[in-house]
Image (cartoon, grey):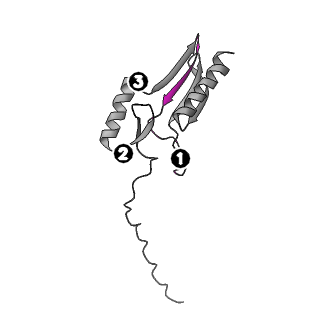
């Protein structure tokens, strides 16, 4: 029986100097309401936390009796694929406090169009 050769040890991958993908980190809105990547720092996290506490995440809210449609800014990218545009807005329709419809969007314009669509479809029916 031949003696077996020792297997080479696996090396750890070399550290990368590339920035973290924008999947990880916090997003904010500029003065015009357009999203920008705020970063991964504690300062970005603190800013996001302060704005969430104030309720600055709600972009549009339309109500009719016990139904309402709300569009919010998500602050964190909900897109799992780093090759795709970030998903930063969400429109949800509620009835009696329960979500009945939910859609997510990558741009403010898409979110606005989605909010209007669900107001027409859901509130005007």
Q: Which residue is mark 3?
A: 55
The quadrant of the image that shows the N terminus is bottom right
On screen, residue 13 above or below 88: below
Image coordinates of residue 108 in percent, x first then y, are 52, 33
Q: Secondary structure at mark 1?
A: loop
- Are there few (<14), some (14-19), or many (20+) residues within 10 Å of tag 3? few
Q: Residue at x 43, y 46 (%)?
A: 24
**How far is disc 1 from disc 2 in space, using C-alphas?**
17 Å
- Are there few (<14), some (14-19), or many (20+) residues within 10 Å of tag 2? some
Give the label on residue 80, or none.
1
Image coordinates of residue 87 in percent, x first then y, are 52, 39
Task: Locate residue 50 relative to residue 36 in the image: left or right.
Answer: left
Task: Locate residue 124 relative to residue 105 in the image: left or right.
Answer: right
Considering depth in this image, is 112 or 12 the residue closer to the camera? 112
Q: Which residue is mark 2?
A: 40
Considering depth in this image, is 109 or 89 the residue closer to the camera? 109
Magenta segment: does it hold 71?
Answer: yes
The magenta-colored residue range is: 65-83
List the single residue furthest toward the front: 32
> Which badge, 3 or 1, is on the more N-terminal residue?
3
């Amino acid at each position: 029986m031949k003696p077996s050769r020792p297997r080479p040890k696996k090396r750890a991958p070399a550290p990368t100097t590339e920035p973290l993908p924008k999947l990880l980190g916090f997003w904010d809105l500029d003065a015009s309401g357009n999203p920008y990547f705020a970063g991964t720092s504690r300062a970005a996290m603190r800013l996001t936390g302060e704005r969430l506490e104030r309720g600055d995440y709600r972009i549009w809210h339309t109500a009719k009796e016990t139904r309402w449609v709300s569009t919010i800014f998500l602050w964190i990218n909900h897109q799992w694929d780093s090759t795709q545009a970030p998903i930063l807005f969400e429109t949800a329709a509620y009835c009696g406090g329960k979500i009945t419809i939910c859609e997510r969007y990558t741009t403010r314009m898409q979110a606005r169009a989605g909010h209007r669509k669900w107001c027409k479809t859901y509130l005007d029916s």
